[in-house]
Image (spheres, rainbow, N blue to C red):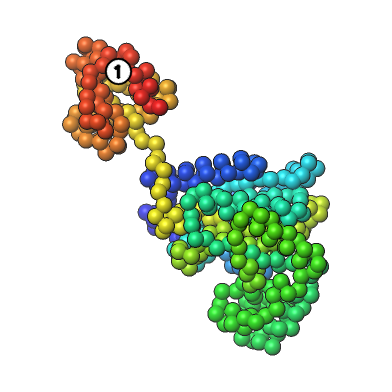
C-alpha cells in the first residue's frame, strides 16, 4: 500500500514531465493568441455545485464523484471537471458586469471514480477553455477551431471532429417526450440506471455504454430531428464558420455528451489510434448553466481535453518531443578548495541564466566525468587544486570531444556567449 499510489493515479516523473511542459507551453501560446486568460479555481467545491451544474442524472455525478464530509460537516466534492467551477467563479465575482465575452482557460487535475483502464484514470488532467457571455455562433466556431488548431500545433493527425446540436429549453421537451415514448415499451430491458433515468432524463440513455441500452436506443428520435428554428439556424451558422476556415467535421446525431448542461452545439474530438478511450476532447454550449447556478441568464460555451490522452495519441503517432533543456555545464571538482571554488562558480553560472551542476556525491574525478556524460552536459569543466592554483580551468566541449584550458576569471562570460 505504502509503496504504490492509489489506483487510477499517476506519478509524472522527470523524463516524462518535459512532455507536459511542452504541452503546457503550447496551451499558453495558443490561449494568448486566441485572447483567453487563465483562471485558477479550487480543486474542491460544494457537492451541490456539481449536482446542479453537471447534473445529478449523469454518470459523472451519480457514480464517479469523490464526495466526502469535511470537519465542518459540509458535503464537498473533488472537481470532476472545470466548467461548473468557472461558472461559479464568474457568478461569485460578478464578472458578468464587465464587458463580455469573458474568455478564460484552465489546466489542472480532475477527479472521477471511473473504471480504470488505459486512458481512463481517477486523477487526470484537463486543459479547458470557457467563453461566457455571447450567443454568437462565431464563438462556437472559434472554440472548436481553437481546439483543432491546438491539436494541429502538437502535430496530431487523423482526428475526427464530431458535432451535433442538442437543442435548447424550447425544443428539448418535444424531443424528451418523443424519446420517452420510443423507449418506454422496452423499459424493462434497459439497465437499472437507465430505467431510473427514463422518467428523469431520457436523453442520458443515448449516452449509456451498456450494450443492451445502446441496441434499444438504436433507432430512437435524435435531438437533431426536433430542433426549433433558432437552434437549427444557429447550427447552420456554426457549420458555415467552420467551413470558412476549412475545419472539417462529421455530423454525429448520436452525440449527446455525458454532462447535462449542454444546449445547442455539442462536439467531441476522436483520435482513432489510442484505443477504447478515443475521445481526446469535447465540449459544447451551455446557455442555461449560469442561470442554474444563480447568475443572470448568460450564454456560454467551452471545451476540455484530457492531457494524458493527448500524450498517448502523440506517442502512438510517433511524434517528436522537442528536446528538453539539457544540463549545460557540469563542473567536476576535486579537493576541498576546488569544490568550494566550484560551488561559487555554479552559482555564478546560474545567476547568468545558465544551467550548471556540480558533483554532490563525493565521486572520484573519473566517476564525475562519467556522471557528466550521463547528464548529457554540453560542457564539462574540470577544476582541481592544480588548476585552481594557476587560475585556470579545463573546459571540455562534450559534443566535439575537445578540451582546452581557459582563465578562470572569464569563464562565465565565455560559456554565456556559447549558450545562444
Ligand atoms: P468531458 O468530455 O467529460 O468534458 O471531458 C473532456 C475530456 O477529458 C475527455 O474528452 C477526455 O479527453 C478527458 N477525460 C475525461 N475523463 C477522463 C478520465 N477518467 N481519464 C482521462 N481523461 C479523461 C468535460 O469535462 C467538460 N467540462 C468540457 C467542457 C468545457 N464543456 C464545456 N466546457
**Residue 416, relative to residue 36: is it above or below?**
above
Q: Which residue is drawn at 64% across and 74% down?
A: 206
Left or right of residue 49, residue 150 in this image: left
Q: Which quadrant holds residue 254? A: bottom right
Is disc 1 placed on a helix, strand or loop?
Answer: helix
Say which of 215 and 404 sits in front: 404
Label 1 neighbourhood size at 10 Å, few (<14), some (14-19), many (20+)? some
Q: Where is residue 142 in the image (x, y as percent from the top left)?
A: 66, 51
Left or right of residue 20, residue 260 in this image: right
* Residue at mark 1: 341
**Residue 145, relative to residue 362: is it above or below?**
below
Q: Which residue is drawn at 60% across and 74% down?
A: 208
Residue at mark 1: C-beta within 8 A of ligand 1? no
Q: Which quadrant holds residue 285? A: bottom right
Does residue 58 appear in the picture of this structure? no
Q: Residue at x 60, y 57 (%)?
A: 247
- Quadrant for the C terminus in the image: top left
- Quadrant for the N terminus in the image: bottom left
Give the farthest residue toward the bottom: 185
Does residue 234 appear in the picture of this structure? yes
Q: Where is residue 404 in the image (x, y as percent from the top left)?
A: 22, 21
Q: Where is residue 407 in the image (x, y as percent from the top left)?
A: 27, 13
Q: Position of residue 262 (x, y in %)?
A: 70, 62
Q: Which quadrant holds residue 257? A: bottom right
Left or right of residue 133, residue 42 in this image: left
Left or right of residue 322, residue 129 in this image: right
Say which of 353 and 316 sits in front: 316
Amino acid at each position: 500500500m505504502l509503496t504504490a499510489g492509489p489506483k487510477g493515479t499517476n506519478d509524472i516523473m522527470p523524463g516524462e514531465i518535459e512532455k507536459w511542459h511542452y504541452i503546457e507551453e503550447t496551451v499558453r501560446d495558443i490561449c494568448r493568441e486566441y485572447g483567453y486568460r487563465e483562471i485558477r479555481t479550487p480543486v474542491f467545491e460544494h457537492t451541490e455545485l456539481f449536482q446542479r451544474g453537471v447534473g445529478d442524472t449523469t454518470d459523472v455525478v451519480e457514480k464517479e464523484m469523490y464526495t466526502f464530509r469535511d470537519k465542518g460537516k459540509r458535503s464537498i466534492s473533488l472537481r470532476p471537471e472545470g466548467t461548473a467551477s468557472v461558472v461559479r467563479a464568474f457568478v461569485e465575482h460578478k464578472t458578468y458586469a464587465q464587458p463580455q465575452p469573458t474568455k478564460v482557460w484552465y489546466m489542472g487535475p480532475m477527479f472521477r471514480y471511473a473504471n480504470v483502464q488505459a486512458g481512463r484514470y481517477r486523477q487526470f488532467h484537463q486543459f479547458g477553455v470557457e467563453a461566457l457571455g455571447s450567443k454568437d455562433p462565431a464563438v462556437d466556431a472559434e472554440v472548436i477551431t481553437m481546439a483543432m488548431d491546438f491539436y494541429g500545433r502538437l502535430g496530431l493527425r487523423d482526428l475526427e471532429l464530431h458535432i451535433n446540436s442538442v437543442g435548447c429549453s424550447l425544443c428539448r421537451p418535444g424531443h424528451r417526450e418523443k424519446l420517452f415514448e420510443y423507449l418506454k415499451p422496452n423499459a424493462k430491458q434497459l439497465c437499472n440506471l437507465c430505467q431510473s433515468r427514463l422518467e428523469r432524463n431520457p436523453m442520458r440513455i443515448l449516452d449509456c455504454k451498456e450494450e443492451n441500452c445502446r441496441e434499444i436506443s438504436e433507432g430512437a428520435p435524435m435531438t437533431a430531428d426536433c430542433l426549433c428554428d433558432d437552434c437549427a439556424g444557429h447550427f447552420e451558422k456554426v457549420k458555415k464558420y467552420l467551413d470558412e476556415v476549412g475545419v472539417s467535421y462529421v455530423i454525429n446525431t448520436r452525440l449527446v455528451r455525458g454532462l447535462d448542461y449542454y444546449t445547442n452545439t455539442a462536439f467531441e474530438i476522436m483520435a482513432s489510434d489510442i484505443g477504447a478511450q478515443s475521445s481526446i476532447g469535447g465540449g459544447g454550449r451551455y446557455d442555461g448553466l449560469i442561470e442554474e447556478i444563480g447568475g443572470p441568464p448568460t450564454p456560454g460555451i467551452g471545451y476540455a481535453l484530457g492531457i494524458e490522452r493527448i500524450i498517448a495519441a502523440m506517442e502512438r503517432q510517433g511524434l517528436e518531443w522537442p528536446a528538453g533543456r539539457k544540463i549545460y555545464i557540469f563542473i567536476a571538482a576535486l579537493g576541498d578548495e576546488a569544490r568550494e571554488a566550484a560551488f561559487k562558480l555554479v552559482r555564478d553560472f546560474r545567476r547568468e541564466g545558465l544551467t550548471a551542476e556540480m558533483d554532490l556525491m563525493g565521486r572520484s574525478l573519473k566517476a564525475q566525468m562519467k556522471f557528466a556524460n550521463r547528464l548529457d552536459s554540453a560542457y564539462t569543466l574540470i577544476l582541481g587544486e592544480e588548476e585552481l592554483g594557476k587560475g585556470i580551468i579545463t573546459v571540455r566541449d562534450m559534443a566535439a570531444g575537445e578540451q582546452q584550458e581557459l582563465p578562470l576569471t572569464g569563464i562565465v562570460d565565455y560559456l554565456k556567449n556559447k549558450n545562444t
